[in-house]
Structure formats: structure tokens, C-alpha cells
Image (cartoon, rainbow, N blue to C red):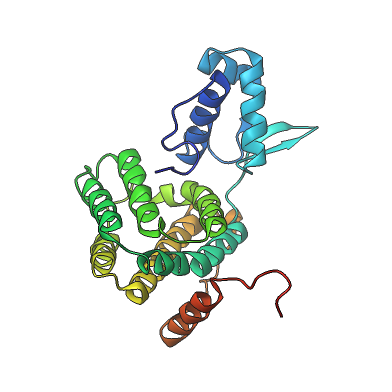
Amino acid sequence: MSMTPGMDRVPKSRTEWVTDQLREAVLNGEIPPGTQVRPRDLEERFQVSSTPVREAIQRLAAERLLITTAQRGAQVAPYDPVELEDIYRLRLMLEPIAAARSVARADDEWRAEVDHSFRAMENIDPGNPAAWTERHNLFHRAVRARCDSHWTLRIIDDLVLHTERYRRLLADLPMPSRPHSEHIALHQACLDADSTRAAELTREHIQGTFDAVCGLLATLSPSTGSVSPVADITSGSELSQELDEQASMSAPRACGSP
């Protein structure tokens, strides 16, 4: 099963290895937002030549984790409350539908994969945030893995990547009980093949994480600005109606048909 970039790939080249290392350093805050990224420093840090460093910077700039300008070179993208709200708004629209469409295609093999990923996440020491984050992402990827829209999954993967560095702000805080109980409920909904319940729980989980990150982000610096709560997009009966509409549209008309 593939992961978000940098999560589970076996590096195929020195450039890929440097890219993965630099990406992780940005995502976990080791290189903080706004930090100037100097190629020579990275060459010394990773003990590589200038070529893989230059290509790694270009790749992370394409992923929008770095900002490059002719005057200042490369720097880590700052925390942006407006970006955060925009990304979570899209996740709240897409991920519940992806979860529902995946659960609707459930079989014993998929249930086993979801159960395995859930138990692997549960067995991780909460004091190891990096390992827990990886298992957490694997669990949610397993939940939506059977969604029949590859474009939806690709977009979600990109959105998750860009919320990761915000979400990891919570890593040093005590683990609240809310995510744990939500994971248990989502796991059970998958085993029960309850697509509507899985969609509702996915949405609640994402909304709760967004609220927690916003609260923490607001305490870091007054310059980060404020983020308004993302309004409910599809909840209750509206969510059920949306899922029904999505299911009806899942088989596109043939070219030329009215």
C-alpha cells in the first residue's frame, strides 16, 4: 500500500533520499517555518554534493513546502491560517465521501487490512509521535483505500501532506481521548460495513483535529492571524443526501450520450 510522499518509499537515488530527509525535517518542525534553507548547509548536513540538494529543494518547492525567490533563495513556507482553513475545508468535503465509497466496496480482505492497521496504530507507544503519526496515516489510508476514484485519493494524499506539519504541532501535547475514541468507532464502522457512519465519523475526526490545530496555532504568534471554524459542509441528513448523489454519479455517462 502506498503512502504519502516520504512515508514508506525505499529511496532509489541520493536525490530521493535527500528529498525525503529534508521533507521530514520540514514536516516535523525541525526546520521551522520561515527558516532560510541554504544549499551549502544541507550539503554538509547530508554529506552530499550540490546536485541532489538542488533537486531536493526544487521538489519541495513544487510541493509548496518551500518558497523560492530570486532574492532570498529558498525558505520553509510559513504557517498560514488561511491556507490551513482552505486545506481542511477541502478535506472535509472529500474524505468523508472517499471513506463512504471505500466502505461500500468492503470485503473480507479490506476489513482485515483496516483491522491490521488499526491494531498496529493502537500498539504504538504514544511517546513516539513520529511512529504514531505514520501508523495513524496508514490507518486512515486503509479506510479510504477502496474508494473507486483514484483522483480523489491523489488529491486527499496531497492535502494530508500539507496538513501534516500543522497537525504535528500537537505532537508534544498529551494525547486527548477524543481521537482514540473516534478511531475505535471508525474501525467498528468499517467492520460493520456502515458507509454512512464511516463518513460521519471521518468528518467529525477531521473537524476535531482542525479545531485543535487552530487553537494551538493561535497561541504561537499573534502574527499568524486568526482562523474561523470551518462551517459544517455535509452533516446529518445533508451528508446522507450528498453520499447518495455521489453514488449516483460514480458511473459517468459514455462519451456522446445526453
| Residue at (23, 66) in percent of width and height | 188
Q: Answer with the quarter of the image where residue 129 lies.
A: top left
Q: Is residue 254 visible?
A: yes
* Front in this rendered view, residue 222 or 3: 3
Which quadrant is home to the N terminus?
top left
Return the x and y of residue 128 as percentages of the image width and height: 28, 39
Q: Answer with the quarter of the image where residue 239 lies.
A: bottom left
Return the x and y of residue 14 as percentages of the image width and height: 54, 19
Return the x and y of residue 29 as percentages of the image width and height: 47, 39
On screen, residue 214 versus residue 117, left or right, reads: right
Query: Residue 63, relative to residue 142: is it above or below?
Result: above
Which quadrant is home to the C terminus?
bottom right
Q: How many marks?
A: 0
| Residue at (47, 35) in percent of width and height | 24
| Residue at (74, 72) in percent of width and height | 256
Return the x and y of residue 257 as percentages of the image width and height: 70, 76
Query: Residue 5, relative to residue 160: is it above or below?
Result: above
Query: Residue 210, relative to residue 119: is it above or below?
Result: below
On screen, residue 86 versus residue 3, left or right, reads: right
Q: Residue furthest right?
A: 70
On screen, residue 103 versus residue 147, left or right, reads: left
Q: Answer with the quarter of the image where residue 48 lies.
A: top right
Q: Is residue 232 visible?
A: no
